[in-house]
Image (spheres, rainbow, N blue to C red):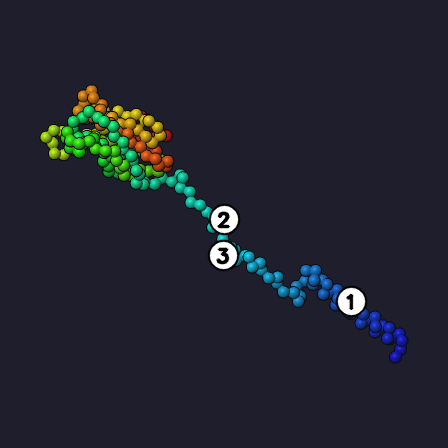
Amino acid sequence: MDIKKLILSSIAVAGLLMACAQSEFAGDSGQGVVGKTKPPEDDSTTDKDKNETPGDNQLVVDDSGEIKLIDTDLVVSRSEDTAAWKNCLYAGIQGQPDVELGCNRVTVRGDRLPPRTAKIKLKTNECNQLRLALHTQRDGEATTTPNLSTVGTISRFQIQKLEPRKFKINANDNFDNSWNDLNVTIYTTNPKIKFTIQGSGIPCD
């Protein structure tokens, strides 16, 4: 064989081998996708994680500003009064029926009643205007007769705010000068409940 042709043939083969090697290197460097498989996904990432917004599974419901009508415990603490008649205190807010909070006696001139806890519907995160009514049972009467908080311009009640969510109430059952016909303190320990006595001019907390 001619030496010159052999040398040219060898050079051509060497050039072809070098071109193939460069092509494979280019693929390894990420510049091509020939002969490469997609890297496996991280097993720590699940389909559930991909479909959720970060933090969705850590949401905490906070109703701190929500107004709800709920059953509220209203503690009624009664002090001694001078009334011989049976006097019962009723209360309620607009749109709700009056609830009996407590009475001073079992019957007219009868036994005294102990303190109690009454259930009343009040709204959370709102200033509840608590209306009052006095039900009085006099001598010879079989039932109590409701008297609204005021008759004309004469009030049935004297109201004193002792602390947030706590009021002292004195009542007059016959328009005389005695304000000790019913002597109670009412309060709630629910921090989401705010209330005042309607017509008293006393603001909520």
Q: Which residue is mark 3?
A: 48
Pointer 3 and pointer 2: residues touching (CB < 8 Å)?
Answer: no
Q: Residues within 10 Å of mark 2 (few under 14, many from 20)?
A: few
Image position of 39 (left or right of 109): right
Q: Which residue is at 14% across, 34% downward?
A: 143
Which structural element holds mark 2?
loop
| Amino acid on which disc 1 is placed | Met
> Upstream in the sequence, badge 1 or badge 3?
1
Dot 3 lies on which element?
helix
User: What residue is drawn where x is 34% and y is 33%?
Assistant: 194
Where residue 204 appears, as percent x and y from the top left, is 35, 30
Q: Quadrant of residue 128?
A: top left
Residue 202 in the image: x percent, y percent? 32, 26
Relative to 14, is 67 above or below? Answer: above
Q: Nearer the viewer, residue 115 or 181?
A: 115
Q: Secondary structure at mark 1?
A: helix
Q: Residue furthest right?
A: 3
Q: Quadrant where the C terminus lies?
A: top left
Q: Residues within 10 Å of mark 1 (few under 14, many from 20)?
A: few
Residue hosting label 2: 55
**Mark 1 vs mark 3, CA separation in Å:** 49 Å
Q: Residue drawn 23% across and 33% down? A: 114
Closer to us: mark 1 or mark 3? 3
Label 3 vs 2, first from the N-terminus: 3
Q: Disc 1, disc 3: CB below 8 Å?
A: no
Q: Which mark is residue 18?
A: 1
Q: Position of residue 196 (x, y in %)?
A: 31, 30
Amino acid type, label 3: Lys
Which numbered mark, 1 or 2, is in the foreground of this view? Answer: 2
What amino acid is at disc 2? Gly
Quadrant in the rendering for residue 25 = bottom right
